């Protein structure tokens, strides 16, 4: 008995443990079902309709797959005798013609019913977004006629219908915030539009979904959905000039290094239009089009190592700046709110 027990224990020890091996795979798969960039965790009307269509088609595909497999098992394992020619003809016409036609027609009608709600032309707010290599130029077009510039971040009030007017300054880009809506291409020489109606306040992640160059994968966007009152207060602050951070040395470095030739900081002499508007850089959620945290050390690193952090970007790196000047510049930029 003792020998048998030892042999059994040895076999159990050699037997591969499958459950722990499967657990990481399951965690990875389930991890895509939620989060700030998940289509399966919608926070807007358009994304909700896309998710509904996805689940309907997934369930329908699963049902059809089960029917086909069941029919194959029945024909190959259970019914060993051949069927008549009439039965075979009925099966071909019914399962091969009638059934697919009915199912595909039903799916088409169901999908078309969703389109009018996603294509409404009445927006409470208009935001123009222009794709550049490799960042996003953003302009809020307010009902009173004011245009408020920003960059790399989209802020919207929850419950409002937002018309996003899309364009590109160079190559084809694709605007995509999975938790809020589907993809819309940005094509040179054309203006496209996307209607967003965010429902749940929070921070979501968007990205360029069309290969646009060497830093395509580093062209992200932060989308912030706010309560209407908070958004109204924020847009008024965003429309105002920059609040000086008090770091006079940082401002001197910004002007002396030529940054003002490409960037605008409203309230100062900087009025460049080539690069992103930096007027309220300190109040944004991230840096470099969603790839770095908005912290002074990250600002300093981006300025000094632009070519390494974002290859192909048109902004030159400034590794020649002394460490003290770089720190002062980063502190000044980070204080612009």
Image (cartoon, rainbow, N blue to C red):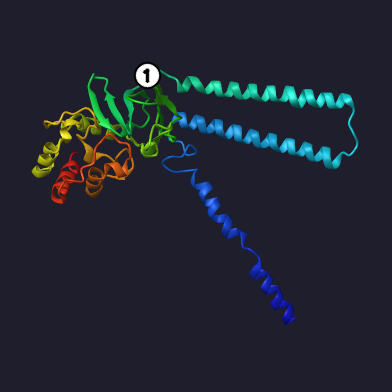
> Can residue 248 be seen by looking at this rendering?
yes
Quarter of image, res 124: top left
> Residue placed farthest to the front in the image?
320
> At 57% from the left edge and 35% from the top edge, which residue is drawn?
55
- Decide if residue 146 is on the left or right side of residue 66: left
Q: Is residue 3 left or right of residue 222?
A: right
Q: Residue at x 40, y 39 (%)?
A: 217
**In x, y percent, where is residue 264?**
18, 31
Relative to 73, say whether 56 is above or below.
above
Q: Where is residue 197 in the image (x, y as percent from the top left)?
A: 40, 28
**Residue lying at 48% horizontally and 19% vertically, measured from the top left:** 116
Binning the other alpha carbons within 10 Å of mark 1 as few (below 14), some (14 to 19) or many (20 upward) gives few
Q: How many badges with numbers are in the image?
A: 1
- Pointer 1 residue: 191
Viewer-proximal residue among 293 and 258: 258
Q: Where is residue 282 in the image (x, y as percent from the top left)?
A: 22, 41
Q: Quadrant of the N terminus?
A: bottom right
Residue 56 or residue 289, whichever sits in front: 289
Residue 4 image offset from top left, x and y in percent: 74, 77
Decide if residue 163 is on the left or right side of residue 295. right
Taking the image as shown, residue 113 lies to the left or right of residue 288, namely: right
- The secondary structure type at the circle numbered 1 is loop
Front residue of 116/289: it is 289
| Up-down relation of residue 256 to residue 137 (above or below) | below
Q: Which residue is nearer to you in this view: 121 or 88?
A: 88
Where on the picture, by quarter, is residue 330? top left
Q: Quadrant of the C terminus?
A: top left
- Taking the image as drawn, is residue 201 in sight? no
């Amino acid at each position: 008995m003792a020998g048998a027990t030892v042999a059994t224990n040895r076999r159990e020890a050699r037997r591969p443990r499958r459950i722990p091996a499967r657990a990481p795979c399951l965690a990875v798969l389930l991890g895509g079902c939620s989060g700030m960039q998940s289509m399966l965790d919608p926070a807007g009307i358009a994304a909700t309709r896309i998710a509904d269509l996805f689940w309907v088609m997934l369930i329908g595909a699963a049902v059809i797959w089960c029917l086909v497999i069941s029919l194959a098992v029945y024909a190959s394992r259970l019914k060993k005798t051949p069927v008549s020619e009439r039965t075979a003809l009925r099966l071909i016409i019914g399962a091969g013609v009638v059934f697919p036609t009915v199912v595909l027609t039903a799916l088409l009608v169901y999908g078309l019913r969703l389109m009018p709600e996603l294509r409404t032309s009445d927006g409470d707010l208009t935001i123009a977004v222009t794709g550049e290599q490799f960042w996003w130029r953003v302009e809020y077009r307010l009902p009173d006629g004011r245009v408020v510039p920003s960059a790399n971040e989209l802020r919207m009030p929850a419950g409002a219908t937002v018309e996003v007017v899309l364009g590109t300054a160079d190559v084809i880009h694709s605007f995509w915030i999975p938790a809020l809506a589907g993809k819309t291409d940005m094509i040179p020489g054309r203006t496209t539009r996307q209607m967003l109606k965010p429902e749940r306040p929070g921070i979501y992640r968007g990205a360029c979904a069309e290969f646009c160059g060497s830093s395509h994968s580093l062209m992200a966007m932060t989308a912030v959905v706010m309560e209407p009152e908070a958004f109204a207060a924020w847009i008024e602050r965003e429309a105002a000039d920059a609040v000086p951070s008090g770091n006079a040395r940082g401002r001197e470095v910004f002007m002396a290094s030529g940054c003002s030739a490409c960037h605008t900081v409203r309230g100062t002499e900087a009025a460049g239009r080539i690069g992103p508007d930096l007027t309220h850089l300190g109040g944004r959620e991230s840096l470099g089009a969603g790839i770095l945290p908005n912290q002074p050390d990250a600002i300093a690193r981006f300025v000094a190592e632009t070519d390494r952090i974002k290859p192909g970007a048109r902004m030159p790196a400034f590794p020649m700046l002394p460490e003290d000047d770089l720190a002062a510049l980063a502190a000044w930029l980070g204080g612009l709110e």
